[in-house]
Image (cartoon, helix red, strand yellow):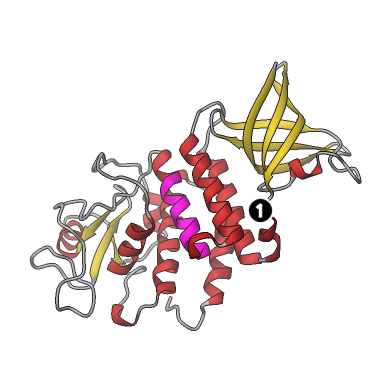
């Protein structure tokens, strides 16, 4: 049987002397594993189709449950990623996360499109997105599609908006009596809480962590997801993520001086901790990207 599909290379593992085994992300069949022969030889005709991030139309021959690439046409190789180590590791993070959150034989067009858009943005700087914006935007979609969505539709407890207050130089939530400049993130429910509800949840034995209103605003800005149909208060068992964080890890004492890079870095830390808690695994490429991106702005960011 022959299969023709668009796909992005998530992983390429050496096999025998000249072959590779590809892990492909497709829009209609989720992940596929396929062998590709002879691509390690000099001048191999299909060498381009076995490169990381390669976006191609693949023709696969299926026999006895195994797929073999017989031909390919490349839409984009995203070659500029090889010239910038920070953007390269951001792209590796996209592939790493897509590999973990996708399933074989399960259609997920939204994840495929989000991965392709993220790689395009990282390679070509489309719409002036920073690497952090591109990765965070992809992550929100990937988490949503995996059932681990983050609710950015106001306070997850009282429903009020989390926003800057009129006349306040720093951020403030709109709930009466809420602490200015402070919101909280609840890892078990994947939701932000206003200062008042977050403090109450902590006092009632919960374990939300203090977060920055600007981090919340940043995630809302780059999100293209509709959160209207959110199922509230779903416990995904994010105990591991909660253990890795100390209360106040994402809190900024002086938000008036916070740079855009602060918000990006804190959002990356929050999303990485949330993702690791839900999936119970580490993401070495994501960790390395965060280190590189943080070091680029060492003078501004306050750990």
Residue drawn at 73 percent across, 47 percent down: 51
Q: Nearer the viewer, residue 282 or 147?
A: 147
Indicate left or right for 283 with 222 as reference: right
Q: What segment carries the magenta color?
A: 129-142
The answer to whether 262 is drawn above or below residue 103 in the figure is below
Q: Which residue is mark 1?
A: 78
Estimate how packed mark 1 is, as few (under 14), some (14 to 19) or many (20 or more) residues with alpha carbons within 10 Å. many
> Overall secondary structure of the magenta stretch?
helix
Residue 5 can be seen in this image: yes
Q: How many marks?
A: 1
Looking at the rendered image, the quarter that the N terminus falls into is top right
Looking at the rendered image, the quarter that the C terminus falls into is bottom left
Residue 283 can be seen in this image: no
Q: Quadrant of residue 38?
A: top right
Indicate left or right for 2 with 228 as reference: right
- Residue 286 is situated, as x and y percent measured from the top left of the image, at 55, 57
Indicate left or right for 165 with 122 as reference: left
- Residue 192 is situated, as x and y percent measured from the top left of the image, at 26, 56
Residue drawn at 56 percent across, 28 percent down: 29
At mark 1, the secondary structure is loop
């Amino acid at each position: 049987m022959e299969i023709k599909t668009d796909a992005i290379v998530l992983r390429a593992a050496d096999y025998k002397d000249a072959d590779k085994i590809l892990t492909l992300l497709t829009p209609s069949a989720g992940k596929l594993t396929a062998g590709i022969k002879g691509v390690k030889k000099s001048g191999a005709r299909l060498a381009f189709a076995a490169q990381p991030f390669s976006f191609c139309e693949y023709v696969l021959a299926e026999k006895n449950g195994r797929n073999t690439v017989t031909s390919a046409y490349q839409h984009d190789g995203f070659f500029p990623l090889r010239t910038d180590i920070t953007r390269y590791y951001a792209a590796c993070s996209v592939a790493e996360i897509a590999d973990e959150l996708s399933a074989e034989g399960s259609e997920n067009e939204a994840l495929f499109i989000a991965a392709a858009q993220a790689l395009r943005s990282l390679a070509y700087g489309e719409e002036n997105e920073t690497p952090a914006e591109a990765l965070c935007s992809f992550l929100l979609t990937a988490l949503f599609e995996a059932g681990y969505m983050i609710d950015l539709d106001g306070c997850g407890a009282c429903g009020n908006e989390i926003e800057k207050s009129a006349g306040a130089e720093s951020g403030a939530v709109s709930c009466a009596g809420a602490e200015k400049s402070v919101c909280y993130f609840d890892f078990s429910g994947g939701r932000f809480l206003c200062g008042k509800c977050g403090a109450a949840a902590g006092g009632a034995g919960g374990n939300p962590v203090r977060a920055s209103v600007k981090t919340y605003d940043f995630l809302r800005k780059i999100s293209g997801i509709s959160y209207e149909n959110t199922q509230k208060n779903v416990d995904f068992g994010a105990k591991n993520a909660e253990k890795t964080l100390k209360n106040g890890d994402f809190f900024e004492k002086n938000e008036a001086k916070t740079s855009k890079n602060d918000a990006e870095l804190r959002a990356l830390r929050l999303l990485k901790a949330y993702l690791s808690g839900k999936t119970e695994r580490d993401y070495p490429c994501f960790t390395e990207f965060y280190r590189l991106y943080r070091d680029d702005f060492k003078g501004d960011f306050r750990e």
